[in-house]
Amino acid sequence: MKFGIVVFPGSNCDHDTYHVIRKVLGADVFYIWHKETSLRLFDAIILPGGFSYGDYLRVGAVARFSPVMKEIVQYAKEGGPVLGICNGFQILLESGLLPGALIPNEKMRFLCQDVHLKVTNHATRYSKQYTEGQILRMPIAHYSGNYFADDDTLKRLQDQERIALQYCDAEGNVTAAANPNGSKLNIAGIYNEYKNVLGMMPHPERAAEAVLGSEDGLGMFKSLLERN
């Protein structure tokens, strides 16, 4: 299986993600410069975290017009798996592959901390290594991670089991106190309608080795590696 990691000007988690896939999992992985226009070689695409184009205008708004994004939209529409992490999530929203928006955090400050997450749907290509309701610990690092959508969209996400992860406490309680940024429904990650596209704010690549304090993010990459 070949993974492709898209590199935008300002990406800064591309090497972290590459390390996990190549060195920890031993899988094939390649960088994809944002001006590339062919994704035929890849079995899964990852949009990593960072500050694409310096977060000018609006987070992810400029990256959405990079040449590679037209191909990624088509790739996703054809069923290809696309994972957007942090800034990658923001870009997926701007491109229309996922609904809603990520607005500045509730207290208007950058957050860099570990959070607990509840696995809301374990029956997808990204979550097969987890169990329903499993509690994970991963870091977040963002200023605009406050997920917002209208009530109809939120209801669709719930009804179609498209909420991937929710912020919770260590016991798995999804509460306002456990919500670091004010996201609606404590949402930390969502799927598209066909669940081949996942956007999430926490960083699984920063929680994939014991030396980092948590290996809870590794299951996401292992799940993708299973293919089916």
Image: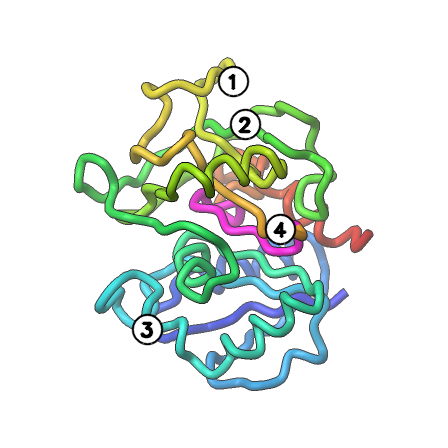
Instruction: Decide which of tag 3 and tag 4 comes sooner along the chain.
Output: 3
The kind of residue tagged 2 is Lys
In terms of sequence position, does the residue under pointer 4 or pointer 2 come before the other?
Answer: 2
Q: CA distance from mark 4 to mark 2?
A: 20 Å
Q: CA distance from mark 3 to mark 4?
A: 25 Å
Residue drawn at the location 46% of the way across and 27% of the way down: 116
Q: Which residue is mark 4?
A: 193
Q: Residues within 10 Å of mark 1 (few under 14, many from 20)?
A: some
Residue 150 vs residue 180, the one in the foreground:
150
Disc 1 target residue = 172
- In terms of sequence position, does the residue under pointer 1 or pointer 2 come before the other? 2
Q: Is residue 192 left or right of residue 145?
A: right
The type of residue carrying mark 3 is Val
Q: Cβ–Cβ below 8 Å for labels 1 and 2?
A: yes
Q: Quadrant of residue 66?
A: bottom left
Q: Which residue is mark 2?
A: 118
Q: Which quarter of the image is occupied by the N terminus? A: bottom right
